[in-house]
Image (tube, rainbow, N blue to C red):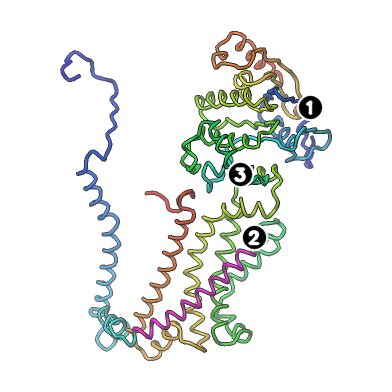
Amino acid sequence: MSTDIESPAPAAAVAVTSPDLEPEVSYKAKREAIWRVVVPPFLVGAATIGLWYFISYAILEPKRRFLLQPPHRVWEEGFADSETLSEMFKGLWSSGRVAFWGLLIAIALGFTLAIIMSQAKMLERAFFPYFVMLQAIPILAIVPLIGFWFGYGRSSRIVVCVIIAIFPIIVNTLFGLLSAESGLHDLMTLHGAGRLTRIRKVMFPAALPAIFAGLRISAGLSVIGAIVGDFFFGKGDIGIGQLLKRYVARIEGEKLLAAVILSCVLGVAVFVFFGWLANRVAGKWAPSTRGKK
Amino acid sequence: MTFPDGTRALTNVSFDVARGEFITIVGPSGCGKSTLLKIATGLLEQSSGEVVLESERVGYVFQDATLMPWRTVQRNVELLAELHGIPKAERKDLAKKAIETVRLTGFEKHYPRSLSGGMKMRASLARTLTLSPPLFLFDEPFGAVDEITREHLNEETLRLFEREQFGGLFITHSISEAVFLSTKVLVMSARPGRIVAEFEVPFAYPRSPEIRFDPEFARLSGQISHALRGAHS
């Protein structure tokens, strides 16, 4: 082609080259990905710690520094001190167990209620408003009641957990169950499938992505529920909420912040776990839950 | 057929579909074609009239593929056999054969989201084929795919019909599709739908794609188009 001077210029030229042929480009892409994916959150983290130091040292005078102890003090008093650390881990373990049972009960109850409501519009209309009301109850207001009914120990903590965590499970599961394509329902009707087959083969699988979206939220909420429950129902083993309360009472700001960070890590861990699980279960076929940029 | 809200969708519609017969109904949108099919399958109950089926096993091909996104092609094709309680080994075998018939071999492990519109439709056809129903109902099945894919799918459908000799009841907007596939084309009027014209298609089976360029094909298409215009006004 290049030797043929007479040939007229093409009106359009389309060329497709495989990116694999140019390793330099892919290396560059990788480096760019690091810049885009790793660096921004790192920068925000560093800036936050910077701001923290700034407030501790530049804004608060030494007398009032206990209001926000600087990061390294939190590290020394909270994480580096083995006694405190083991105390906090014990608390975390106790609260984690409460969160686990609370979530489990919320899942079992939430699924059952959602499945019942999915079976008839009338049932949905009858029950749904009350779940919205349940969701709107300020947990603080019914703490005494829960105490009367379930005592001031672990059962009450679990109850708080369930109340806080159940709503997203009900809503997402119900929404998911009803999201199955009507054509698939027709197909089931045509081939004489019963109610259970329909739930098992059509509605439940169709609901999985929504269910997992709900679980991710509820898992985080159940951790919060466990800590809140701990705050009010401190009988029995000591959860992280009781520790928080104790540190506040003793004005141990460093330990308090360390405990807050640890409970936060627990919340993040369950969130990540359910994200991973969702991907394992439905990642191959479900439409991506995250938008592309 | 009169709906509870008083809409009269169909009136005085009567015809038979025998095995080896492929009948297509063309009509304007909203003339009640889909209502008719739903009545034929029992998805809707007619307000008056009668449907007599030779067998309970009716193949129904939907407007879109209606595959389960969470199942692979193989498992999607197995679905109907599963619903009818056919044992696993047999159902695998049935699905394999059906997948072969629609030429999707090699895609068994793919999920629907990675298939093209035409391939999804073929998977959907394969699913229906597993039951080898004596009657196939098609509810505007190829409306959503592009023209070239549609022609391919038509040829595929024709091949299936020639092979299996089922009774076919096909619903479409497309006149050329109707003529290409059918032994008989029925023209339906706007609501309330009734059959206003009937055309026998003289081409013998097996048909080649070339009949689309036959003058007789054009003449017949013209007549149907004319009848359809009449039905529209």
Instruction: Please indicate whether residue A51 sits to the left or right of residue A138 in the image.
Output: left
Image spot of residue B102 (x, y percent): 54, 31
- Amino acid under label 3? Leu
Label 1 and label 2 in one chain:
no
Dot 3 crowding, Cα within 10 Å, few <14, some 14–19, many 20+: many
Question: What chain is tagged by disc 2?
Answer: A
Q: Name the residue carrying label 2.
A: A115
* Nearer mark to the viewer, of 1 and 2: 2
Q: Name the residue carrying label 3.
A: B79
User: Looking at the rendering, which quadrant does residue B170 occupy?
Assistant: top right
* Nearer mark to the viewer, of 1 and 3: 3
Dot 2 crowding, Cα within 10 Å, few <14, some 14–19, many 20+: many
User: Looking at the rendering, which quadrant does residue A83 occupy?
Assistant: bottom left
Q: Disc 3 on helix, strand or loop? A: helix
Q: Residue at x 49, y 50 (%)?
A: A286
- Towards the viewer: A124 or A101: A101
- Amino acid under label 1? Val
Q: Is residue B155 above or below residue B4?
A: above
Instruction: Please indicate whether residue B167 sits to the left or right of residue B48 in the image.
Output: left
Give the CA distance from mark 1 to mark 2: 41 Å
Question: What chain is tagged by disc 3?
Answer: B
